[in-house]
Image (cartoon, grey):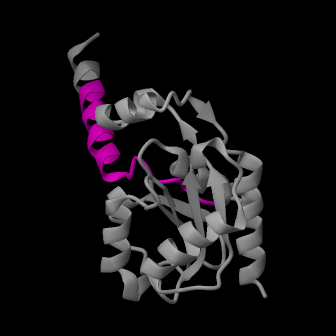
Amino acid sequence: MNKRTFIRSGLLGISAIVLGRKASALEYYPRLSEKKWAVLYGTWCGSARDAGVWISEGMDGIANVFDVRENPDLSKYDHVIVGGAIRSGKISPELQQYLEKNGEVLKTRIRGYYAVCGNMMKPVFPETKTMLIDNHLAKICGVAGLPSVVLLGRITYGLMEPDVRKQMESFKMPEYDNLKRTECMAFGKEVLAASLK
């Protein structure tokens, strides 16, 4: 390799690194839409992230999907779906703080809610939805009566904090995956249809 090729390759590599840092690594890039949609989620082990991406797929990929840890500016979006993984009956502290801090911006934009929880591998009943959505997530956001869903989640021990993993293992809980892409996509279609009424 000659000196000129080496320098050019080095500059291209550095440019890729610098530009890559400016891009949002967790952001899902949507298809173009007349209205701007976003899905905001908080997660511990990734199930709420996957649900958010699949919800956007159900909307034909028009929603941008954001991890709350990115601290996204959602003021430029017309419609927002809010969701989070549930642990001990609550969303993550990061999601709760973000929703409280940005409540005024989000209040007129929220179009639906979703929660992802293992639910001890039991089916989701209407009471579960009331507890996790109506009495928790919707109350934090201050907007009720929107399309909502509780999705069964998964356990992956390798993604858990050591203390949480130890606690879950003490319950003799096996690793499992009950999150269904089809259910997430169906919810995306439901929210989109409701927004068009």
The residue at 66%/78% (across/down) is 34
Total label count?
A: 0
Q: Position of residue 178 (x, y in %)?
A: 67, 40
Is residue 20 on the magenta stretch?
Answer: yes
Is residue 194 on the magenta stretch?
Answer: no
Q: Position of residue 14 (x, y in %)?
A: 25, 35
Q: Is residue 16 above or below residue 25?
A: above
The residue at 48%/32% (across/down) is 171
Q: Is residue 127 above or below residue 158?
A: below
The residue at 32%/47% (across/down) is 19
Residue 81 visible (yes or no): no
Magenta range: 8-32
Quadrant in which the N terminus is drawn:
top left
Q: Position of residue 39 (x, y in %)?
A: 54, 65
Q: Position of residue 68 (x, y in %)?
A: 38, 61
Camera-side residue of 122 and 189: 122
Question: Residue 52 is drawn in which quadrant?
Answer: bottom right
